[in-house]
Amino acid sequence: MTIRSRVLTILLCLLAAAMTAAAQGADNRSIFGPPIDKDGPTGLQETLYRMRVQQSKKEYDDMLKRGEEAVRLAEDLDRKLEENGRLTPTDFAKVAEVEKLVKKIRSELGGSDDEADDQTDEVEKPATTKDAVTRLRSAAASLYDDLKRTTRFTISATAIETTNAILKVARFLRLAN
């Protein structure tokens, strides 16, 4: 073997040793590409977990928006009843919208639609439409307050009971029409 081939062999060995040492460095640089992102997902399971967390946050935010919308509609109904003295067909459509929003909230909270098994001790049915709309407004505000106090990890039995009370009042208003 000639001196030239020995020097070339030694240089190749040193280059291989340098590459191996650089790969074992403590920093997150790669000698062949861009820096390795330690903050990003490292695998499929972590990516799926992050997606589930984002979806859960979105569902919780949507539930809060539904609660806020139910409060807005109930307050609008109360204001319209004060102005006109009665509810119009458009107002009854708003009652149906409140009912739809509250049903969605109740299902997201884990409540079910078992009216036959409903044994809540509600004081009494509203005597007038004005009383029913007032109860609807106050119950919707109470529900929204309950939703704001919870997190996406909790289930509020109080909020579920409030949704049931709102649905009873909404059904009363619908039947009173």
Image (cartoon, rainbow, N blue to C red):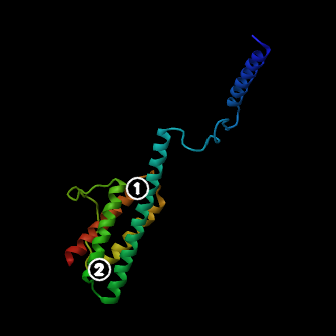
- Disc 1 marks which amino acid? Ser
Q: Is residue 124 visible?
A: no
Q: Earlier in the sequence, mark 2 or mark 1?
A: 2
Q: Which residue is mark 1?
A: 156
Q: Does residue 60 appear to the left or right of 167 in the view shown? A: right
Q: Position of residue 90 (x, y in %)?
A: 28, 81
Q: Looking at the image, which is closer to me, 56 or 16? A: 16
Q: Position of residue 99 (x, y in %)?
A: 29, 68
Q: Is residue 10 visible?
A: yes
Residue at 27% from the left image edge and 71% from the top image edge: 96
Q: Which residue is mark 2?
A: 91
- Disc 2 marks which amino acid? Asp
Label drawn at residue 37? none
Cα distance between the residues tagged 2 and 1: 30 Å
Residue at 54% from the left image edge and 39% from the top image edge: 42
Which of the two discs, 2 and 1, sits closer to the camera? Answer: 2
Question: Looking at the figure, which quarter contains the N terminus?
Answer: top right
At label 2, counting other C-alpha atoms closer than 10 Å, the crowd grade (few under 14, some 14-19, many 20 or more) is some
Q: Residue furthest right?
A: 3
Q: Position of residue 74 (x, y in %)?
A: 36, 75
Residue at 44% from the left image edge and 52% from the top image edge: 56
